[in-house]
Amino acid sequence: MVERSRAFHWVTIDRDRTPEIPKRFNVAAYPSVLVLGREEENVHRFQGFAKKEVHLARLEEALRRHALYREGKPWDAPDPRPAAVAEGEGVSSLPAPTDGIPGGIAALGEDLWVVQGETLFRLDPATGKVRGEIAAGGTVAGIAARGEALWILPFDWTAGGAIRVVDPATGRTLREVVTEENRRNRHSGAKGIAWHGERLFVLEGMEGRIRELDPATGAVKTTLETKRTWLGGLASDGTHLLTAGGGRLLRIDPATGAVARERPLNYGVRSLGFREGAVLLMEQPEFGFGRSHERIQVWPRIGETRIWALRE
């Protein structure tokens, strides 16, 4: 590693003594390594501690990109990726309303509801055309449909935030459901909500726990341990609970929490829904930095955000 690092001219910045430099290069995570061009262009950058082999791979990528930069060739094109979220037949998609961060998908009557940013969009499920919208009221981790209402899960449910039951016609909150035992927590990490028959479930994605709640009081009735971590999205197909993580669409046994079936995915998933035999997916956006160190969305490309449907 020492030998390879000699290919670089290293400059160490003390952020306490020169705070204007991290600000100039849009650095918010430490440690960060920036490889700069002659005009301070962002040739390559990475952050965080890493094992030896990972760090060496980062250095090699920096040298590869810098060689392209010196030759006057494009150096920052992202690696190609599959055109669809999954392989095989039965994969289709609709255009998403915006490029905002997904926060949930739910089918209600003749409408498909999608959260992006802090807005709930009511869509035509056949075309993706926007039929209406209402304010989400904050950062949303998931939505579910029940009767004629939408159940909106906030990201801070794990820290005591209230699930809101909302009239989709007006956006009015009909009632709130609070899990009292969460009020003493500080960690926010809710990732999805779903009705499975008469049972209400909420996903704590990082730990891979699915909590069954009493829909009247919000109290936790049971906890399912999936033995998977970093999961995103929650839905029901009528037989299994659906979630995603580790590059897999997972079908979960609602009685035991065990993974009953898996399907490979090409993208990370942020939101999940289910409608008329199709699993609906929206991917977790990937972010990076542009040539002038501005924060950019790398995947999906701006203007190309999709709502994917998988049929099996």
Image (cartoon, grey):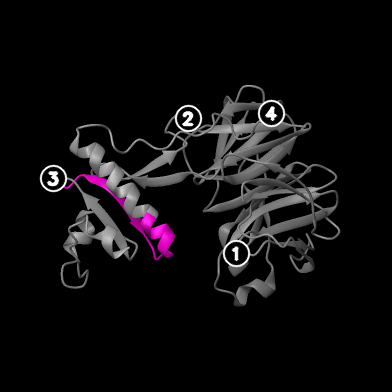
Question: Which amino acid type is marked by label 3?
Answer: Arg
Nearer mark to the viewer, of 1 and 4: 4
Nearer mark to the viewer, of 3 and 2: 3
State the separation of the CA atoms marked 4 and 2.
Answer: 21 Å
Secondary structure under the numbered disc 1 in the rendered image: loop
**Earlier along the polypeptide chain: callout 1 or callout 2?**
1
Question: Which amino acid type is marked by label 1?
Answer: Gly
Question: Which amino acid type is marked by label 4?
Answer: Gly
Disc 3: which residue: 38
Q: Which mark is residue 161?
A: 1
Secondary structure under the numbered disc 3 in the rendered image: loop
- Residue 211 quadrant: bottom right
Q: Eyeballing the image, is 175 above or below 113?
A: below
User: Magenta part of the protein: which range?
Assistant: 40-56
Nearer mark to the viewer, of 1 and 2: 2
Disc 4: which residue: 88
Q: Which residue is depicted at the point 29% across and 42% down?
A: 65
Badge 2 crowding class, 10 Å Cα cut-off, few under 14, some 14 to 19, many 20 or more, is: few
Q: Where's residue 184, x and y in %?
A: 61, 77
State the separation of the CA atoms marked 1 and 4.
Answer: 40 Å
Disc 2: which residue: 304
Q: Eyeballing the image, is 11 above or below 44?
A: below
